[in-house]
Amino acid sequence: MGHRLTTFVALHQREKKRERERKVMAMATMEEIPQSPEAKLGMRVEDLWDVQEAQLSPTEKLNACFESIPVSAFPLDPSNTEIEIKSDATLADAVKILAGHNVFSAPVVDVEAPEDASWIDRYIGIVEFAGIVVWILHQSEPTSPRTPSTPSSARAIAAAANGAAFALELEALGLGSAATTAGNFFEDLTSSELYKNTKVRDISGTFRWAPFLALERSNSFLTMLLLLSKYKMKSVPVLDLGSGAIDNIITQSAVIHMLAECAGLQWFESWGTKKLSEVGLPLVTGNQIIKVYEDEPVLQAFKVMRKKRVGGVPVIERETKKAVGNISLRDVQFLLTAPEIYHDYRGITVKDFLTEVRSYLEKNKNASPMLNEYVTCKKDCTIKELIQLLDQEKIHRVYVVDDDGDLQGLITLRDIISRLVHEPRGYFGDFFDGVLPLPANSRV
């Protein structure tokens, strides 16, 4: 018995020694190759992973690692820093700024706030392309007869913000219904006084928070990851409380890029080599996916996304019932930045929209290439392969298909992050229990 125990201990020690040698060799190799900031961050997680208690599960180890790292360590994203939109900027200006910097959203600074204002008074929220979509879709919806005096309808919002004459101009543009919207509508809209004079602050009802949920530099990675996954935030501002300004904006895409840069590290491989089904993906099954047909009006597609609170939908060919494309809320920018390409259409279908946008991007190489293509994977794909695909294609969703190409599910960036960590019991206390209710016109 004693001999067997001695042999077991010796084997265990040799295995531990070999493991240390492999890690030293891997470290030496990585030191020879220039590392990205994200890869260096991954090494920091690796160091913490090595000292976690052996009895902890992999998920518990990752939770502990991410709880030990402050969000100030997250690499700055040049595309998201120092881009702010003033509250008195017009929607036209906001669209140009967002499209010009190839970003989906930006914080809005209150121009009336004093110089020494705290961050909560300095900012009024975050404006997104999706928020501008909400504003546009309000223009196509009739005033509710039950709430004639409530400034939640399109005409009431326009009248309250810009006077009764503006509300009448809205009617004159002729956006009666999504089905009858002519191709020249958006060209008329973007050249109208309504679009040119409506200020960003006038659509603050589309902002999710007032001003927004933010983290301090000392808050943990775990908090940030939970906000981006379970609590459905697409981006999280990180504040420098000293200056009262935003120090960084961490997006779901930035987290996925960080994970892609960590391939090869033990902590990542222990999780990333699992098949989708092993981590409970996809969360959305084939029969739960919201779809639109390619012959439907494009504005109707945006209405569906808004109503169902989804960021994108597959485009289905009516005859074959096969998916032939993808359209997302942020694609509305092409209706606003290049409305002339639809001028000759009596009505813009989803197919027309996608065809013209692809043609426009081909002719305008410098245009912001933000059109999301239809990208798929199979059920036997690993988390690592999926992350690398999302990062490489710069997309926010992947559709899971079978061998015949039929839709089996949908996986988003948020779904993946939600499978990386879990929320410890009582972690946020009662913070989300009605403390910050969603505005009536907000979008999750």
Image (tube, grey):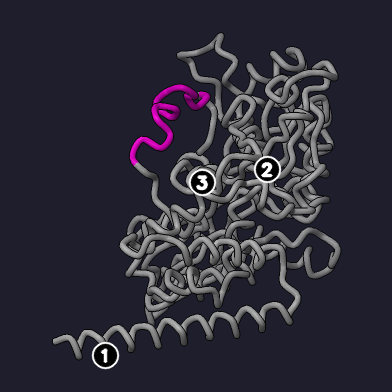
The correct choice, above or below, for 247 with respect to 19 in the image is above
What span is in magenta?
A: 425-439
Q: Amino acid at mark 2?
A: Phe
| Total numbered badges shown on the rendered structure | 3
Q: Earlier in the sequence, mark 3 or mark 1?
A: 1
Question: Callout 2: few (<14), some (14-19), or many (20+) C-alpha neighbours within 10 Å?
Answer: many
Q: Which mark is residue 7?
A: 1
Q: Residues within 10 Å of mark 3 (few under 14, many from 20)?
A: many
- Nearer to us of marks 3 and 1 is 1
Residue at the spot of label 3: 305
Q: Label 1: few (<14), some or many (≥20) within 10 Å?
A: few
Q: Where residue 110 sits: x, y (%)?
A: 78, 23
* Three-letter residue code for mark 1: Thr
Look at mark 2 in the image and give the residue it sits on.
129
Label 2 vs 3, first from the N-terminus: 2
Of 325 and 438, which appears nearest the observer? 438
